[in-house]
């Protein structure tokens, strides 16, 4: 990347009119692969449209393609604790299914871990080796899915 000043994160509720919700500092000029992350602190409880505005040191900019994420108000009853966490997180599973998959994602959307739990009640995930930051756990049970967010201190 050449002359990268920063990225502006923009969100829209209709995919047409966007507002800036955050900014991440860029790395200037580099041939190294860089990974950036940003977690929306207050997503809309419906469809959210996102795009990035990449700004160069001279002020010129370019937009990314638009991506969308649906955040639902529907709650399945699963609870993740403690949050923030240091060594582990526990998910109190409230569903009826006998097999559950829990997937752990970093802020870039990369799946770090995926495990199958049989007859789950409490799902415990070891997070000692994770870097501090925001993470997501997706719980899938064949009937529904829920995504839970936590912060690793």
Image (cartoon, rainbow, N blue to C red):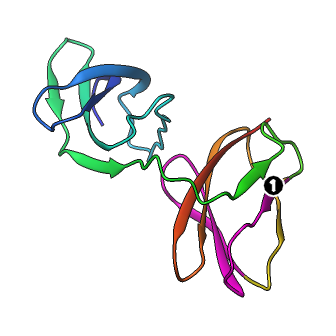
Per the image, is 78 magenta?
Answer: no
Residue visible at 35% across and 29% down in the picture: 29
> Secondary structure under badge 1?
loop
Please name the residue that numbered disc 1 is placed on. 127
- Which residue is at the front of the view, 42 or 33? 42
The residue stretch that appears in magenta: 89-116
Per the image, is 102 magenta?
Answer: yes
Residue visible at 46% across and 33% down in the picture: 40
- Which residue is at the front of the view, 58 or 146? 146
Q: Quadrant of residue 52?
A: top left
Percent x, y for residue 33?
Answer: 44, 47
Q: Quadrant of the C terminus?
A: top right
- Which residue is at the front of the view, 141 or 110? 141
- Most prominent secondary structure in the magenta stretch? strand
Q: Quadrant of residue 46?
A: top left
Taking 31 as reference, is 78 above or below it?
Answer: below
Q: Quadrant of the N terminus?
A: top left
Residue visible at 40% across and 25% down in the picture: 26
Residue visible at 14% across and 18% down in the picture: 60
How many numbered discs?
A: 1
In-image side of 13 versus 21 (left or right):
left
Percent x, y for residue 67?
Answer: 25, 48
**Residue farthest along the left direction in this orientation:** 16
**Residue farthest along the right direction in this orientation:** 87
Q: Quadrant of residue 124?
A: bottom right
In-image side of 152 versus 58 (left or right):
right
In-image side of 56 versus 145 (left or right):
left
Percent x, y for residue 92?
Answer: 79, 61
Crowd rating for badge 1 (residues with CA inside 10 Å; few <14, some 14–19, many 20+): some
């Amino acid at each position: 990347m050449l002359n990268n000043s920063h990225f502006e994160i923009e969100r829209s509720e209709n995919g047409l009119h966007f507002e800036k919700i955050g900014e991440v500092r860029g790395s200037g000029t580099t041939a190294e692969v860089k990974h950036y992350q940003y977690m929306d602190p207050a997503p809309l409880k419906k469809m959210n449209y996102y795009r990035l505005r990449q700004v160069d040191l001279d002020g010129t900019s370019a937009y990314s393609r638009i991506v969308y994420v649906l955040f639902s108000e529907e709650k399945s009853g699963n609870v993740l604790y403690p949050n923030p966490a240091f060594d582990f997180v526990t998910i109190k599973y409230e569903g009826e299914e006998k097999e559950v998959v829990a997937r752990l994602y970093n802020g870039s959307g990369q799946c770090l871990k995926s495990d199958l739990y049989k007859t789950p009640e409490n799902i415990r995930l070891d997070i000692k080796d994770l870097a501090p930051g925001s993470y997501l756990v997706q719980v899938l049970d064949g009937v529904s899915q829920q995504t839970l967010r936590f912060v690793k201190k």
